[in-house]
Structure formats: structure tokens, C-alpha cells
Amino acid sequence: MRARMFFMPCPSELQIRLMGQIHRRFSKHCPTDAEIHERVKKFGPFIPIALYWLGCQLDAFEKSQKKEIAYTCSTKATLYYALQSARPITRHDRGLNGLSHHLARCVVKRDRADPFLGYARIQEDFSCEAVQIAFSKTIGEMSMLAVREELIVINQSSYRKMEASIPIYLKRIFELYALTGLQWKCCQMQLQSESTTNMKWVSFSVKLNQMEHNITTFQNMNAGVLYYPSDRSFPLVDMYYKDEFGKLVGIQATLANEHAKPVLTYQRFYDMIGTSPENAELELYYLILPSEIEHFSQSSFPESQFWCDGIGLQSKNIAFYCLVPPDDFELIIP
Amino acid sequence: MSRYALSSLSWVLIARLRMTLVLGFEPVRTGIAWRKFKYRNLAKLSLNDESYAQVCKQVREKADRVHTDDDFTAWIRAIQKATLLELRPEDPWTDNKDLIQVRRMRAEDLESQVDLPESEHEYEDTLDVIKLPLPIPEEELSDAPQFLFIRPDEYALFKCFGQSRWCILAGNPGISKSWFQWKFILFCYRLDLFDKFSPFKEKLLDGLKTEDKSSTKQEQVIPAESFIPKLIVRTVAGRRSLFFFVGGMKMFYLSGIVERDWTASLMKIQQSYGNLDQAIHQFTTQVLKPKSLLQCLLKKICFMSLTCALVCFLCPVQVNSKFD
């Protein structure tokens, strides 16, 4: 007798805040909307923590969370084991036994085409923004060699436990190599409605001089500078720069096959850098693992690949590209 | 006696379990499991007066104490009889025992739009807030025991459960897996609610020809795809059981069924519960919430480990042809 395992995803922050709104009608102890937002950001989308827990309980959780982060990030081995090993999420940290729910949460990739709608498969993600930042910081301090080694293993592995960590590695290697001068390959992702030519892989080269972590407007951007906002809520892209022709280039490290974003996200990006699609042509590069290339090698893509409600965006000055490092994650494709 | 003579009645019986030894395993994971029926002709099955009497008789023989639970009886009866009312954003909640009030809430209903993160899926954008006719008797310590918060994911999970023989639901602690049991029970009693608010086009109540949402009519409906149990047994930590007769029949709490050594393995649990096979029929879904016994249980049945805080098994048991 075998049971089929289903996984319940965590509620979204919006859903928890809506629950809190109802609870506040009955309990004066229920946190405010802003407090719930902070708790989700800090501890994860867990209902009791967000809505009921007292300060002492939150303190204890935070202490455990920090302790586990410190241990997990202490060595390369513990970091690798936590992020890539096939250990399930545990209730409590038990050393080299995977991550606990202090740091990780179950994620379901919903899929209507799947007989079980995607709920029978599990993936993991960082439990909250605070944890993701902690891991990003650790990976962000890794050497070029160490990141390369990690990515080679990840790229060759069929099992990916903490997929959310992979874009962090990809961002790190791009950041390092872009300042050295990389030469990888890319190809334009054409819309089905606009597809005119065959898919063609071409060389992608970039050499930037410095990196800045502040959000800089398009007008104030300097050529040769990689803008890598430290604000995690920065929309649409992870990094951006102005190429030698003055064109705006965005880099988004991803594992997602579909990258549909609402038009609002695009708009927020333009707003934050003080321009508009009409005034700044954008080349948006999806930076992927070499092993993910199959999906991105299609001759054309439906609009749902890029935006979920983007009627009219076709006419905007946006071109999408897939950017792929070599299998060995070297600086230059041989 | 008429087959549905007792359909308008709802009883809850409670009984205490004999004390059982509990192994000292700490709860680590959460899950709900459900074994689906072997047979698909469920629509032909129905609990009637005779089968109900059999269930009661055999349960009483096994349990230390069985009695009617008036609170649960009233709760389930109210759910069965209530009219479904969808509230618009501007409509206030009312205290009305004749209504199941449902409000679909979205980001725009939030008091503050500040720092609202971008959702990753449309299922994260809505929340159905349901005000039940009466508070859930067992959840009175909750701030809002009369409310259920149903996410689109939970409709999907209910649908998934109807398609597998045994299911285990796992997930992080604190994401409302325990409360999902009440939603599961609510859906079973009110398929019309599921159909109206679930994100799926397929309806479970395809056969319903009337506006009458009473359980008597609901009982006769042929489920389109999913298995909908006629009897749900909710067992909490091996101490007591709550029997929900979904077809508008009675329900009761049961205790004392589980033998002392039931923690040893699932087989023994099965054997212990096997005593109930005569009482819990093919059309039963069993909800188990062993809590601290979880790890031990999972080692025996689950082949792979789970993640969180508590576990429930929902397992229909063997068919008894005399109730067919």
C-alpha cells in the first residue's frame, strides 16, 4: 500500500494579511497589517507566527533562525548540503540534515495539465526574504572558483532541491565575470505573433568597469557600470546597465520556463529608473543554466512567456533574449 | 423504514478513548492521507437507517463511551440547512444561523496596500472568507471560530484527494493543514459551495437538479469525478473520533477504539481499526491526526518522510455489501 503525497503550499502574504483583517475584528491582540507584513518578511508565510505569536515566541524563532543560518553558511560543505541535498525540510535544525522550516518552505508548481495539478511534487524555497538575503550575502561573497564549481555540479544534477538558490549563483557569476569581460552566447526570443527569422545563437560579450548597488535612473546611468540594486523588491530585472550604444540592458537570472510578469511590473521598472518604453529601448536577457537551454531553444514563444496581461506591450521597445554560459561556466565559450 | 427517514436529523455522539501509551516522538511533519474506495459505484451507496444502526451498535461495542454531541450536531445541521450567500465587498457580515456567508477577498479589500508583494500565481491573489452558521465547536479557542479561510489551493487539494486511494498532505507547520480538515468536511457536505467557488469548471454536483441544497438531495447526487465520502471519521491523536455522516445522517464521537499497541505500526492500527471495518464502510473517509505518533506511523506506511507538525489519514475502509 502506497500513499500519494500531496503538498500544501504556504499561503501568500496577501492571504495572511486578509486573514489578519478578519481576526482583528475579534481580537485586539492581532497584529496590525504592517506588523503582519514585517513578520512574513522576517519569518515566512506561516499563519500562527504572523497572526498569533507573542514577542517571546518570535524572539525564540528568530534566534533559532539566525543560529541555523550561521551554521548552514559556515562552510562550503554545509551550504551545499543545505541547498542541494535531498533532505526534506525538518521541523527543527538537526545539523547536516537539510534545512528546517526556519529557513525553508515547501513550494508547489501548480500545473493544470498534471493529473494532480502539480500538488504531488514538491520543491523548496527560502522561507522568507530575510533568509534569502542571508544566503545571497553568503553566496555573494564566494569566490569565482567556488561559484563555478557549485554551478557545474548544479547544472549536471537532475535533482534540484532549493531552486531559489540557483539564480543567486547565476547572478554572482555574472556579476564577477561582467567586470572581467565575459563572452557567452545568446539568442533572441521571438514572439509567435512577430516571429520572422529562425532562432540563431550569437555571441554575447560584455565588459563593465564597476558595479553600483543603488538604483540609478536611466538618464544618470553611465556606460560601463553594472547597476545591481541591493533592494530585493526592485522589479523585473536583477541587474541593468547601459551598453556602448546607450541601449538599456536588463539581466534576469532565472530557472522559470515561463517568465510572465504583469504589465505593472514592467511599468514599475521603468518608473524606478525614470524612463518609459518609448524613451528607452530595453534588451531583457534571461540568464539560465546551460541544462535549461531546451525550452529556450524554441523558434518562437507565446506572449504568455513574457507577460500575463500585456496587451499592447508588443509594440513597446522590448526585446527578449536568452543568455547562456558554457557548461563549464568559464569566462569565454570555447 | 424509509431509506432517508433520518436524513433530516443530525446527531453527534462523543465517547472517550481508553488511555493509550504514546511514544515520545516529536511531531515533525504534517499530512493528511486518504484512501479512496476500491469501487466507483458510490452513488448507489447510501447510509440508511439500518446501516446507521449497525454503525452505532458496533461502535458502542468498541468504545468506552459514546454519546451525542449536541454542539456538533447543531453545527453540522446548520451547515446542511444553511443557504449559501455570496457577499459583495460592500455587504456587511451578519449573524444569521441560516446562512453560509462567503466573501471573496482580493488585494483591493485589504485595509492597507502598503508593501504588497507581487504574487507568483493567480491562486495567491484571492481568499474566500466563509462565515459558518455556527462556530466550529472544537475551535472555540480560535479568535474567529465561525470563519474559515479557503485558498484556491485548498479547492485544488480537495479535488486531488478525490483521485487517490491513500493520500498524505504535507507542508510547513502553520499553514492551516489542520483547519483543512474542517474545510474538507464542509466541502463534503456542501458540494454546491465547492462548485460555486472552486477555480475549476468541472462541477461535482452535476446531477443536482434542484435548488434545494438540503442534504437529502445532495446525497443522491452522483459525483462527476471525485470520490465524496458518505462517512468521515475524524480521529484526533488516537483518543477520540468524530463520525460525520455526510449524507445527512447522524454523527457521533467515538473513543476507546484504538488498542494500546496501535502506535507500533500501521498494520496494528489497521487491525485495530479493522475492528471497525464492520462499522466504517467503503464509503468512509477516515481522518487521523496522530500528532506525536506521526513519525512512527510514517515509517511504517509512507516510504518517505514528511515535513511538519501533524498528520491526518483519511482512509475509506472495506466495503460491507450488506450496506450496499
Image: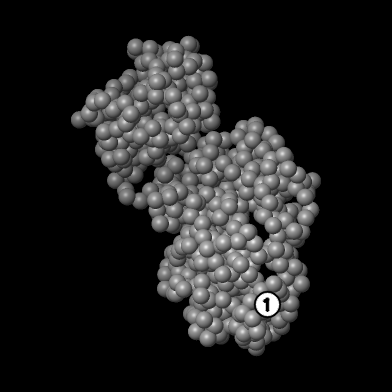
Q: Which quadrant of the structure image shows residue A328?
A: top left
Q: Position of residue B46 (x, y in %)?
A: 56, 76
Residue at 48% x, 59% y is: B160
Residue at 62% x, 37% y is: B107
Q: Position of residue B32 (x, y in %)?
A: 54, 64
In the image shown, does B94 or A147 lie closer to the viewer?
A: B94
From the viewer's perspective, is residue B148 above or below residue B5?
above
Q: Kindly identify which residue carries mark 1.
A: B6
Q: Mark 1 lies on which chain?
A: B
| Residue that protrudes farthest toward the left in the picture | A334
Q: Where is residue B247 in the image (x, y as percent from the top left)?
A: 61, 71
Q: In which quarter of the image is the N terminus of chain B?
A: bottom right
Q: Position of residue B286 (x, y in %)?
A: 56, 72
Residue B247 appears left or right of A199: right
Residue at 67% x, 55% y is: B84
Residue B189 appears left or right of A303: right
